[in-house]
Amino acid sequence: MEINKENNKNLVIIKNLLLIITFFLSLFILKTLKTILIPFTLAFIVFLIFKGVKDKLSKKGLPSGIASFLTFMIIIILTIIINAFIYFGAINFINRAPEYAPKVNEYIKSTANILNFNYLEIKDMDMQDIVNKIDIGKATSYISSIISTTLGSFTSLISNFTIFTFFLIFMLAGSNSLDYKIDKAFKGDKAKEISKLIYNIEQQTRKYLFIKTVISLITAIISGILLMFLGVDFLIFTMLLIFFLNYIPNVGSIIATIFPVSVSLFQYGFGLKTIFVILVLSIIQMIMGNVVEPALTGKSLNLSPLFILFSLIIWGWIWGIIGMIIAIPLSMIIKIVLDNIPSLKGISILIGDK
């Protein structure tokens, strides 16, 4: 009896060690093969969003090949439009950013005067000399180069049709054969059970991704229209930031709001217009993120704040800024899968908000 207990204890230890090894090995593989896995993951997310379009075209009597081709063309056209926005937004930001160098200099000067740094003996020094030592032009150019590099890598990734398109074509082409393969591989009720499980996962995932994308788009458009009426610069770049960063809960919306507020601050100073920009963007983010999205997706899809933070750190470390953007959609897909597998539902409860 004691020997059996000891063996069971050893088995538990071995199992836990194997889980830890598997976790770190998975991280290593994801980081090492990111050149292939990032396009594959993006293609998979896009496929889940647009598979419903293909299914509707097929139900209208179109052959599977034609339905896949039309769906693919819709995705490519939207991809080109997104790339165009990214390109022109980045170019506009890079070209106009140096114009803000004198304004940033003046803002630093006035802030330093207001703070009255006696202990640094700044009173006895020429503030302009101090400010001039900070080469804001070079700093702005450096920041611009970082942003353009980031956006450029993201653009080249999305528009790299030799990888992204390759995966997408095969996913669309092979989607109809899955049910047939399940029927052949499993018999009777087992096949129906597996088909139902995959269908539920697919439907819930598509619903979440579609709703999240639409909400991000609406948030970006409404914010862009209001900022346009207020005359805030870098409109396209700001809309892109709001759209992509909206996929990152809490942190993303804050970062997306900071940029247009900073632009308004340097453009108009800390006056009524800047305060209005802060209020308007905050209200839009609160309504869309805390009212509209939960009402559409349901509270069951909420994730624990700690798990969200963990996901952002892990995926950001593995795949950089793109990893942070797709971290929550990937985490939601994982949670939906766990919700639909009875033996793993306990893990889903642990990573959930409630």
Image: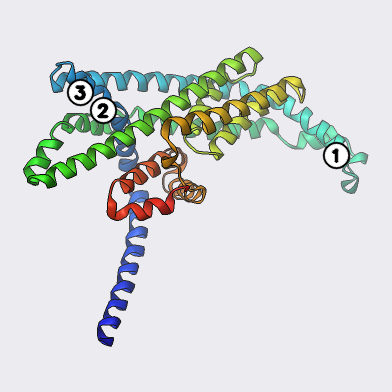
Q: Mark 2 sits on what residue?
A: 51
Residue depicted at x 34% and y 69%: 17
Q: Residue furthest bottom?
A: 2
Examine the image and state in which quarter residue 138 appears.
top right
Q: Amino acid at mark 3?
A: Ser
Question: Alpha carbon of mark 2 to alpha carbon of mark 1: how far?
Answer: 58 Å
Question: Quick one: SS at disc 2?
Answer: helix
Relative depth, front residue between 54 and 319: 54
Q: Residue at x 29, y 81 (%)?
A: 5
* Disc 1 target residue: 115
Label placed on residue 68: 3
For badge 2, the amino acid type reads Lys
x and y, in percent, of residue 200 in the image: 27, 38
- Residue name at image x 46 percent, y 23 percent: 217
Is the residue marked by circle 1 packed among few (<14), some (14-19), or many (20+) residues within 10 Å?
A: few
Residue 272 shown left or right of residue 171 in the figure: right
Tag 1, which secondary structure?
helix
Residue 326: horizontal and vertical position, in percent?
A: 41, 38
Residue 193 appears left or right of 12: left
Is residue 224 shown above or below 154? above
42 horizontally vs 225: left or right: left
Q: Pointer 2 and pointer 1: residues touching (CB < 8 Å)? A: no
Which one is nearer the viewer's eye here, 207 or 278? 207
- Work out how far the residue at label 3 is from the one at label 2, CA to CA, in angstroms: 9 Å
